[in-house]
Amino acid sequence: MNNSKLGFINKNRRELGMFGLLIALIVITSWGTRESGVQALFESKFLSADNLKNISREIGIYGIFSIGVGIVIITAGIDLSVGSLMALLGVVFLYFVTPPDTRPDSFLAKVIPEIPWFAAILLTLLIGTAIGVFQGLLVGKLKLQAFIVTLCGLLSYRGLARFSADDTSINISDSSQNLEFLRFLGEGSLSDVLSNGNGSGFLHSVPMSFIYLICFAIFFGVLLHKSVFGRYIFAAGRNELATKYSGINTNIVIACAYVIAGFCTAFAAIPFCIYTGSVQPATHGAFFELYAIAAAVLGGCSLRGGEGSIIGILIGTAILIVLRNMVNLFGYPTPLSDAITGGVIFVGVMLDQHGVSSIKKIFAKRRVTGN
Amino acid sequence: MRGINKTFPGVKALTSVNFEISKGEVVALIGENGAGKSTLMNILGGVHQPDSGEIKVNNKIVTIKSVSQADSLGIGFVHQELNILDNLDVGANVYLGREPRKLGIIQKNIIAEKTNPFLKVLGLDISPDTPVAKLSIGQQQLVEIAKALSKEAKIIIMDEPTSSLTLSETDKLLNVISDLRDKGISIIYISHRLGEVSVCADRVVALRDGENAGLLAKDEITHNSMVSLMVGRELERTTNTNGSKIDQTKGFETKDIITSTYPNKKVSFKVSSGEILGMAGLVGAGRSEVAQTIFGVDPNLGGLVYIDGKKIKRGSAKASINAGIYLAPEDRKRTGLITQFDVSMNVSLASLENHSNGLGIINNESEKTTANEQIKKLNIKTPSAETPVINLSGGNQQKVVLGKWLSMNPKLIIFDEPTRGIDVGAKAEIYKLMRRLADRGVAILMISSDMEEVLGISDRIAVMHEGNITGILDREEFTEENIMHLAVGGSSES
């Protein structure tokens, strides 16, 4: 193997390892859900068109906000407000696209007008981004601790969501304007555009949210790994002071990460609330911030900052979703799913940090003391 | 210690090294960075184990497997980076891990009682319940020594104890050392500052490349003899090469600059193009603050800055960098470099705009080319431009900091303690580089606490005391006494 190849493996060791884990999970799940025989591997429940469609839709939505959180983590920050923000924005978005008389009886429901779908999308994105700007300025400029700022966000956005929905679930109403089109944006797939809904086959069943994710990944991948701004993100996360001493306004760079997170969350909130069809404000998006953090950390982002990659975050997200799917398909009790996910993340990260060699070392020591 | 060998993966750190010290003796251990001083002392202090060789304490062969074992043998280690918890008080630090307690409750008054005598011996006029955060670095150093004494240390190892002390604190420490010697305690003194070594050492042991390089008895200790032992050859001192291309019509000037540490004092001075202005003073005199304020990382509280007679915009590091004012800061690892980034990324960090297109996408080719140019020009010893700078030696790291600025268009470069923690050979290279830059027309401001360096390199010397410039010396007035006089607040007339 030549040097450049070795360099590639060294540089992307974490991503490659986690990709291996993902493949292993896919193989295990396919094997466990196959009908019978080896040939049937490709006809397993896991690899069925419907299941693939479902998990890729989920990967799409989770991936988008995980990218936002991942970028914040690379600046050595944290964003805990994602799940609550998704609930708040879900409520707001559904209000925008439903007639006021079908809404519950709450203050916000009376104030928010019904507006055209594109304005609803734009406004929702705008509100999410504005909240990102607010949190970004508090963390970047005023140097408040990210954990505290976004923890307050986690509590207040959830509270606001519940208050504005009168703590009842808000449904996407049949009287919504352009319901068909919104459904397409939220939970449709490529076939709806390619062949008027009649197409079949692999490409045709790719859900829209997965396509959004690919666009996000390309855009933020270039931004993070190829652009000057991305270099500043890594630099500020590694050593903010030295970055400042190189003439870079780290306050702004760090604030921007939270703006990106706000935007990504808002963007994911829209297809998510359409897909779920209703927003139960007390539970909608609950724990999503933690899934995002898990995905980012699995994918190689360090909570100390300055480390991570978009491709890693994608792999991390995929691992989370496939794991959950596996628990479902294997028929384990759903409540167990988080426990299993937690265990696998722990083992994965542990192996990555200390490697197989450390396990060998433990055994080697045993042998010595055994003698 | 006899015939000590130690190998680290890939490096033979020590080869048959011998070292001895008698009761009540001060032995200075000198050598360039990487000569093996710290390894040898870490073996004595129980941090590392030797591959072979024997250690005798009071004529008894001992193996020192851990720091606590070293403690019980009476070997105390005062590390270069202070191992002190500044959220605790003095007594708690001295008795950390050995707190006298009753039913698990710490007996504070007993700690105070026990700590007091040690503080007195060291001339520390503070109470044991003073929070360490309130002490100066010098006092904290003494608290560490108190800790060693409280463990009944008979041998105290001091690793670069004066590297962050002011001149008066250094004097105090040297006094403490001779007091301790008179009390029969042996001291191993590791330092790059040969001036101090010649003052306090009874004997000098030099290491070079992990081997014994020679011994000097008390009356043989001179600057030149020590340097030649360390580097293995007589090193010509880079002195008295006066700036030949000083152009007083050009360069840098600042008027009435105000720093946040001394908000009611104003500082004005000039550095001509081609000139090296040394800036001396005690630690805390406000020199670094002046540098950081000029550079724009400290808040702009007023004052003007001119380059070549033109007033420049102030208020951010970006504005200063655009005007060609660069700072090579005091603490390389904290503020000068992103140590986990590679050489190339560090060199380009401040000038990425020059290596990117209109969309802000970085051109890797151009970035790498610039880095390789600087590696060549500055003779940076690194396997490649993609090596993380954390793997380079101190001298080469400092060169990477310079590479960052030299790839741009420097008018004034401020060097804040440019050779701290850098070995003798690399120091000489940095000095030559500064002179070369000056000869190219760059104005250079060099802040340094190393007296030899200030006297040897500067064309003029500005001395600061508590936020004021108390005097500016021309070359014919260069003496250590003149500098000290101004540094403690005397005016230049008296």
Image (cartoon, rainbow, N blue to C red):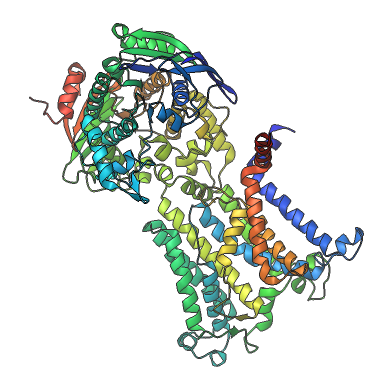
Q: Nearer the viewer, residue B488 or A333?
A: A333
Q: Which of the 4 quarters of the picture holds residue A141?
A: bottom left
Q: Is residue A301 left or right of residue B402?
A: right
Relative to B325, does residue A183 appear above or below in the rendering?
Answer: below
Provide residue B293's location: percent of width, then percent of height.
28, 42
Q: Nearer the viewer, residue B287 or A127?
A: B287
User: Count the marks: how many?
Assistant: 0
Q: Nearer the viewer, residue A196 or A97?
A: A97
Relative to B115, does residue A259 appear above or below in the rendering?
Answer: below
Provide residue B304's location: percent of width, then percent of height.
23, 43
Q: Is residue B375 left or right of residue B152?
A: right
Provide residue A35's location: percent of width, then percent of height.
89, 66
Q: Is residue B190 left or right of residue A8?
A: left
Query: Which residue occupies the extreme bottom position in the image?
Result: A101
Q: Which of the 4 quarters of the picture holds residue B404?
A: top left
Relative to B317, does residue B31 appear above or below in the rendering?
Answer: above
Residue located at (59% from left, 56% from top): A296
Query: Which residue occupies the extreme left position in the image?
Result: B494
The answer to whether residue A266 is seen in the rendering is yes
Provide residue A333's location: percent of width, then percent of height.
71, 71
Q: Nearer the viewer, residue B384 or A13?
A: A13
- Quadrant position of the C terminus of chain B in the picture: top left
Q: Is residue A122 left or right of residue A315?
A: left
Residue located at (38% from left, 59% from top): A144
The answer to whether residue B244 is seen in the rendering is no
Relative to B262, does residue A323 appear above or below in the rendering?
Answer: below
